[in-house]
Image (cartoon, grey):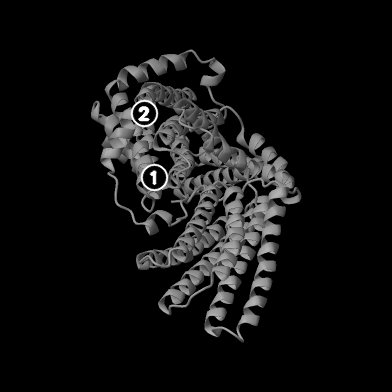
């Protein structure tokens, strides 16, 4: 039991180190990573390189694929683009196997502890990028420390070192149950790899366990056979890692579901063709491993034979590279298959605008998930402008039956309330992940923006209701009043349009100044027009004049909210 707890503890240190390292690199280079993903623009080969680079940094193919699902969910990536990134993510995760293979070459304490020593002061004393860099280095050191602890915790059955006999007996029973069944053995161990990855929810952690156990003699005394078994487990891990993205897509839209299915299809297709050539491919990889320098084949500290570890790393890399080179030419076909697999559904406008926080347990994507929030905020701005156009249509057509349009605008106002709630909750979840100061400031600004936009939609709907009241009560505005309302409406429309064009982008100072000027113009007009209305009350219909001033007041309030959005947007510029 002690041995099991030691293995679990070592695995915990490894996973925690991976989490800290991943979140540190997101804070340090998250904006560049998001920009790289957003700039793929249909090039599948560039997508592969981007996926390779991103996964190499965050050290988790699951994190990258979940991020891809998130980007597809909000339309930042197309299905074809996402498939290329997923292929690159599979290739990028092979770096983990090489790190684990090298573990047997060194005294881990001599590597891990100094690395932690470098990262520790940067993390606790540094600020901004230096703090994030320190977090990355600290996580990297913890990852190495976890691997070292795992190496020490796994009983070395080859060297005959005494260990917990109950653990050894259990291991030998299950290994024996799966072994000596010819080719079926490799299929069974592949299934075991799937189960292992599902349990630890990390292909990197599963890879660490696999290579460590193979090198320690758990898969038999014959090194070549131990390598083939570990290679079969690696194939299972490639399938098991697709479950995380699949689960992340459950609450997403159709395109995101298709991206997750494409990930699954790509990995399963690769595993199928590899099973066909498995014996020949592993024999070739074993010969390649024979070409390694003798110093790489033998590990220190009596850690059995390191050739199995390096051969597994070679197999993992060669398999994923071959799979990418083979299937990259069939990306359109993969996309066509998953489109049939996940047919288009008639989603309501509400379903399409819902924002759901998509992440995973082991490596959180708080920094990178901001892209979804930015896209949702821009959609809310478009939504507000569409509502304003709807109001103008209702106001400018007094003789038409626009009851259905009024009903639609009511639904849009309720939808805006829902959008604000979703985006605010989402941003709060993002900021709870200990982001860097810049992103935390951007999130605070975006929370203000959605609040201003929601208030703006309330103003627009009140304008619609005032217009509806005017028609229902048969109140008549003079041509002069209609012209004045048209003047304010034009000014407000210009302000809202400027906000929509520059929201969350680097805004030229003159644009901000122009919106402020438009807000001041609307306020000046409101005061002047309402003063005229007060004078007319002694002679005309008070109810008409009161309605007229209410319209002016709501238009001015709308211009004020537009200015508030622009000021907050300037604080949260992301480009």
Q: Which badge, 2 or 1, comes first in the chain's sequence?
A: 1
Question: Mark 1 highlights which residue?
Answer: 256
Between 11 and 520, which is closer to the camera in this rendering? 520
Q: How many marks?
A: 2
Q: Residues within 10 Å of mark 1 (few under 14, many from 20)?
A: many
Residue at (58, 38) in percent of width and height: 35
354 lies left or right of 342: right
Q: Is residue 436 visible?
A: no
Question: Mark 2 highlights which residue?
Answer: 331
Between 32 and 281, which is closer to the camera in this rendering? 32
Instruction: Please give the label number shown on residue 228.
Output: none
508 lies left or right of 410: right
Q: Secondary structure at mark 1?
A: helix
Residue at (51, 30) in percent of width and height: 52
Q: Secondary structure at mark 2?
A: helix
Instruction: State the quadrant of the C terminus.
Output: top right
């Amino acid at each position: 039991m002690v041995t099991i707890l030691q293995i679990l503890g070592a695995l915990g240190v490894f996973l925690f180190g991976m989490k800290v390292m991943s979140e540190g690199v997101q804070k340090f280079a998250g904006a560049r990573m998001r920009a790289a993903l957003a700039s793929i623009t249909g090039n599948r080969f560039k997508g592969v390189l981007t996926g390779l680079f991103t996964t190499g940094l965050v050290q988790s193919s699951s994190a990258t694929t979940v991020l891809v699902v998130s980007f597809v969910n909000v339309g930042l990536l197309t299905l074809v683009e996402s498939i290329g990134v997923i292929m690159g993510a599979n290739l990028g995760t092979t770096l983990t196997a090489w790190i684990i293979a090298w573990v047997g070459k060194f005294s881990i304490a001599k590597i891990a502890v100094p690395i932690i020593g470098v990262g520790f002061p940067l993390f606790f004393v540094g600020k901004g990028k230096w703090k994030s860099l320190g977090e990355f280095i600290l996580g990297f050191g913890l990852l190495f420390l976890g691997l070292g602890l795992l190496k020490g915790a796994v009983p070395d059955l080859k060297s005959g070192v005494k260990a917990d006999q109950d653990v050894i007996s259990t291991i030998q029973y299950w290994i024996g149950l799966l072994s000596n069944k010819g080719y079926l053995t490799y299929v069974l161990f592949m299934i075991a790899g799937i189960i292992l990855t599902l349990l630890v929810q990390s292909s990197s952690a599963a890879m660490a366990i696999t290579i460590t156990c193979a090198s320690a003699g758990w898969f038999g005394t014959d090194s070549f056979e131990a390598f083939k078994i570990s290679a079969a487990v690696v194939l299972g891990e490639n399938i098991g890692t697709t479950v995380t993205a699949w689960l992340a897509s459950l609450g997403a839209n159709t395109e995101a579901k298709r991206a997750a299915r494409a990930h699954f299809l790509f990995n399963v297709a690769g595993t199928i063709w590899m099973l066909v050539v498995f014996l020949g491919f592993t024999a070739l990889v074993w010969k390649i491993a024979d070409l390694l320098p003798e110093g790489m084949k033998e590990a220190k500290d009596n850690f059995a034979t390191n050739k199995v570890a390096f051969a597994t790393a070679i197999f993992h890399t060669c398999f994923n590279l071959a799979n990418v080179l083979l299937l990259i030419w069939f990306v359109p076909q993969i996309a066509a298959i998953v489109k049939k697999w996940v047919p288009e559904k008639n989603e309501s406008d509400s379903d399409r605008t819902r924002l759901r926080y998509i992440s995973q347990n082991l490596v959180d994507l708080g920094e990178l998930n901001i892209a979804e929030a930015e896209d949702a905020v821009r959609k809310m701005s478009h939504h507000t402008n569409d509502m304003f156009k709807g109001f103008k249509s209702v106001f400018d057509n007094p003789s038409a039956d626009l009851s259905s349009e009024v009903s639609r605008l009511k639904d849009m106002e309720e939808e805006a309330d829902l959008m604000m709630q979703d985006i605010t909750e989402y941003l709060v979840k993002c900021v709870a992940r200990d982001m860097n100061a810049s992103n935390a400031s951007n999130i605070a600004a975006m929370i203000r923006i959605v609040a201003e936009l929601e208030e703006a939609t309330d103003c627009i709907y009140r304008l619609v209701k005032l217009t509806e009241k005017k028609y229902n009560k048969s109140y008549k505005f003079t041509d002069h009043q209609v012209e004045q309302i048209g003047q304010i409406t034009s000014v407000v429309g210009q302000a809202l349009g400027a906000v929509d064009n520059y929201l969350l982008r680097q805004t030229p100072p003159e644009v901000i100044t122009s919106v402020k000027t438009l807000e001041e113009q609307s306020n000046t007009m409101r005061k002047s027009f309402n003063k005229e209305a007060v004078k007319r009350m002694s002679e005309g219909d008070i109810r008409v004049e009161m309605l007229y001033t209410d319209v002016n007041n709501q238009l001015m309030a709308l211009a004020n909210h537009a200015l508030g959005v622009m000021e907050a947007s300037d604080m949260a510029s992301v480009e």
